[in-house]
Image (tube, helix red, strand yellow):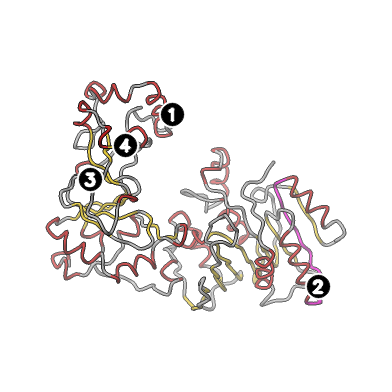
Amino acid sequence: MVAKGYVQTPEKIVDKMVEKLFHYQTPSDQSKILDPGCGPGDFIDGIIRWCENNNTPLPNIEGIELDQSLAEEAQKKFLQYETIKIIHDDYLLYKTNFYDYIVGNPPYVPITQISENEKKLYKTIFKTATGRFDLYLLFFEKAINSLKSNGYLVFITPEKYTYVKTATYFRTLLASKQVIEIEHLDEKTFKNLVTYPLITSIKNSVPYKETSVIERNGEQINVNLPVNGESWRPYLNGKNEKNKGLTLRDICTRISCGVATGKDEIFILKNESVSVDLQSYAYPTISGSELSKNLDLKSEYSMLIPYNLNGKLKKIEELGPLLEYLSQPNRKTKLENRTCVRKSKKKWYSFHENPPLYDIFKPKILCKDIAGEAYFWKDVEGKFVPRHSVYYLVLKDTSKIDEILEYLREDSVKDWLNNNCQRAHNNYIRLQSEVLKKLPVPEKLYPECK
């Protein structure tokens, strides 16, 4: 079998991680070390270098690799070492021993690249195999459970496990151990692969001290990590103030991502391309790229919507000219091949998700889903249909839209979102409904909600 997700770890990162692995306890010739998903043996090379530089005997090292060619490469490379064993097998299914040290770079494989059979199998084995899990979480879980008491583990992974909802259980598991250090690395550590990597160093013991956090700019703080699985992001930023007052969730009837048609190239048209007979189905729509600080809301595009204003999909006989447009062979085939149709049994002319038009056409506040910094706009007439790259907020009291908009544009809100949002490419922030819902709101703006 060929392994998914292998990416070579730069030598300087390997040496940094091995140094962290042995920082608190020097290995002996009796120590047992594991490199899961070892590839051609980058970390094993690093351990050999460390032992030579520190006049330390080489411990017993076990590398496990699924990719046959990589496993054979490692076997040949370390053939002369009696204490190094390379196993060609699937680490996630292999019955491992217990180890004094574990180090590595587990494969990053999103759920979209995992087969249905694999998903079903992993869910029977791993507690971290929930939601839209990534393979590196499963590697991490198994490694922690394969560590001897007071053993040490050092992994390099994406930072996403520290805040995504999918990793809630994993954060709970990790917080039950002594997380010694979390070091954020440069986003270009793996050249063209942007992962926002971090190195996590763990001792398999109950927590007995704070976790040292090293930021990408070199700043260092010590924090107490939460034990209930909540996002670690504000804690790692040193901004873990508990909000016991109002939030956006309290003052909004809806905080949602915009409409996902599942095939924008068909449902989204330039305004001038909308024929007269399609105009009654066409509504102004706006994407994140069309939101600009220097301009009022305006859009050059319209969305063809096969739904009633209550958000219910129209019957096919109600579509009229829209049916003729959508039924063109090249269009209908594309619509029928969408995942939402093939797997979810939705009507071939439906959207990926039913749009809540009864909320969408109310006065609302908009923001981009990904931005260098958060900024908000108002659609006071409620005429724009936000696309899936836009989030929209519908207030319970729409008469307060200007007051809330003014507050959302304050620096304090930008700082809060910067400390709590996920990261995207180029260190942009990714705004999501679960984070927006937790945004604090001054009670003076909504005294009736106290």
Asked which secondary structure carries label 4, the reply is strand
> In which quadrant will I find the C terminus?
bottom left
Three-letter amino acid code at disc 4? Ile
Q: Earlier in the sequence, mark 1 or mark 3?
A: 1
Mark 3 sits on what residue? Answer: 384
Looking at the image, residue 161 sits to the left or right of residue 230; the answer is: right
Three-letter amino acid code at disc 3? Phe
Choose top left, top right, bottom left or bottom right for residue 324: top left
| CB under 8 Å between discs 2 and 1 | no
Alpha carbon of mark 1 to alpha carbon of mark 3: how far?
28 Å
Three-letter amino acid code at disc 2? Glu
Label 2: few (<14), some or many (≥20) within 10 Å?
Answer: few
| Label disc, if present, on residue 337 of the rendered structure | 1
| Foreground: disc 4 or disc 2 | 4
Mark 4 sits on what residue? Answer: 268
**Considering only vertical position in the picture, is 29 above or below 345?**
below
Alpha carbon of mark 4 to alpha carbon of mark 3: how far?
13 Å
x 28%, y 32%: residue: 273
Q: Earlier in the sequence, mark 4 or mark 2?
A: 2
Alpha carbon of mark 1 to alpha carbon of mark 4: how far?
18 Å
